[in-house]
Image (cartoon, rainbow, N blue to C red):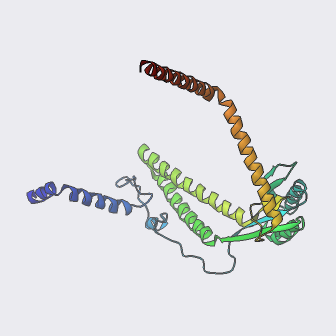
Amino acid sequence: MSAAINWIKNNKITSLLIIVVVFLVFEKSTPVYQAGLNYAGRGLTLNKTAESMMPLAAGDAVKPTTSTQNRMVITDSYLSLVVKNVGAAQQLIVKKAQESGGFMVYSSLNNPAENANASVTVRIPGKSLQSILNYYKTLALKVVAENLSREDVTNQYTDIDARLATLNKTKAIFEDMLDKAATVADILNVQRELLNVQDQIDAQIGQKKYLQENINLTKITVYLSTDELSLPYAPLEVWRPGVIFKEAVRSLIGFGRMLAGSLIWLGVYAVVWLPILLIVFIVKKRFAKKHLVCNNSKIHET
């Protein structure tokens, strides 16, 4: 015993590391909902199936769905359109989505009087996706870009169902324990764990509803403009003199605005830099005059 104590004293850092490792190992092996609950000797024991009903540990995984049928896919589509009238096209896009059983999620319109550009996001039933995309394209003078992305969330959906099943079983266990609780401390402990489980159940249900809504309702984002260069996607043509001229004019206008803005700032801050400049000028002039007087005195003396 004394030898062990002496070894610990001589190897304090190593001993501390061993204690930390042992603590972490035992903490990881502790069941999620049994931590902090000690009902031994109180008549509140879990039945034989309790262990199998506990929530999945962090390292556990549900077997992925391998079937190619009935896959759950979230679809997002993006269109970039040059149109004659941005405001009218924006209204038609929203109207078509509503007629198909969908709704508008987001809409914005910039510079409606000149070089108008807008973006509108709608959600529509997935079965109407292709027909609605075709209709939106008919509103355009030119389709600058089109993108369709799909994300398979089948395994996520399956994992949520598995977690919900386990959490509901665990909740039933704690409800049974609550009925058998004999002391106030036991009742409070079990109620605390029940609230914890219920919070996790609510979170999983919310995530499931979110996935289901995204699966059933496809999102379409449409960018609209009368000018191709105002759209978020660059033109495909490599070189066009007309486009280069427009870019040069815009650059010149931008430079002019920046120069005018700088002059405004300079004028506003004149109350600061003008007195400083005046003081420097006066001091410099007096110093030069004094220097000239000294030089003239030296000349007369000689």
Residue at 60 percent across and 55 percent down: it is 202
Residue 263 in the image: state x and y as whole percent: 70, 37
The vertical placement of 247 against 110, above or below, is: below
The vertical placement of 131 against 28, above or below, is: below
In the rendered view, does 193 fall on the left or right side of 240? left
Q: Picture quarter containing residue 214?
A: bottom right
| Front-lying residue, 212 or 197 | 212
Asked if residue 49 can be seen in this view, the reply is yes
Residue 130 in the image: state x and y as whole percent: 82, 72
| Front-lying residue, 294 or 159 | 294
Residue at 54 percent across and 76 percent down: it is 63
Residue 119 in the image: state x and y as whole percent: 79, 56
Residue at 55 percent across and 26 percent down: it is 280
The vertical placement of 17 against 240, above or below, is: above
Direction left: furthest residue: 2
Number of numbered discs:
0
| Front-lying residue, 259 or 55 | 259
Direction front: furthest residue: 302
